[in-house]
Amino acid sequence: MSTRRSLRRELDHYLGLRRALGFKLHNVGRLLGQFVDYLDEHGVHTLTTESALAWATLPAGASSNWRAIRLSAVRGFAAYLHSIDPSVEVLPARLIHHGPDRATPYLYSEPEILALMRRPPDCVRSCGRPPTRR
């Protein structure tokens, strides 16, 4: 892709093809239009992983989920462009981690479990269970 016009033309072809297959692509189309504008503003004529990451990580305070959404939109377009122009890099999956981070579970040791089992019954009240009537 040597000029903005060809990137814009290829974007129109890509979106037209995907929409013909039944995808609506409202947000993806808007995001990819912004991405092509970004490439033009920065004088980039070939889509690269570096340029995609630079755009996807904007703005600086955006969440990792938003960044992953932006990069995902570009990834599909890059794969399409690569089929036309081998100089276009196909973006690797999961360049930006997204989704909730799970806490590492704590595994109690056998002595800790035994110590918990030896606790007096009064600790049940502090664990959030309602007191039993006698």
Image: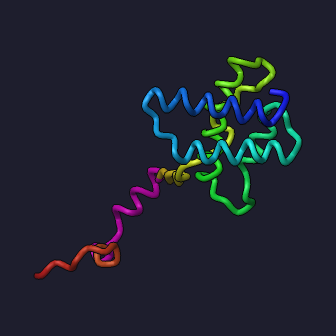
Q: Quadrant of the C terminus?
A: bottom left
Could you say where residue 24 lies in the image, as x and y percent from the top left? 46, 39
Query: From the viewer's perspective, is residue 85 above or below residue 36?
Result: above
Q: Residue at x 66, y 33 (%)?
A: 11
- Observer-nearest residue: 92 or 90? 90
Residue 5, image x and y in percent? 77, 34
Looking at the image, which is closer to me, 81 or 60? 81
Farthest right residue in view: 43
Picture quarter with the N terminus? top right
> Which stretch appears magenta?
108-123
Frontmost residue, 59 versus 103: 59
Please say whether residue 124 is one of the residues in the magenta stretch.
no
Q: Indicate the quadrant where residue 92 lies.
A: top right
Residue ID at (80%, 42%):
39
Task: Check residue 114 for magenta coloring.
Answer: yes
Residue lying furthest left: 134
Position in image of residue 130 (x %, y %):
22, 77
Q: Is residue 115 above or below residue 130?
A: above
Residue name at image x 80 percent, y 40 percent: 51
Residue 8 location, x and y as percent?
71, 36
Q: Based on the displayed image, in which of its 4 quarters is residue 15 positioned?
A: top right
- Residue 125 falls in image quadrant: bottom left
Q: Residue furthest bottom?
A: 134
Picture residue at 61% right of the left edge, 47% below the top: 30
Q: Is residue 95 left or right of residue 18?
A: right
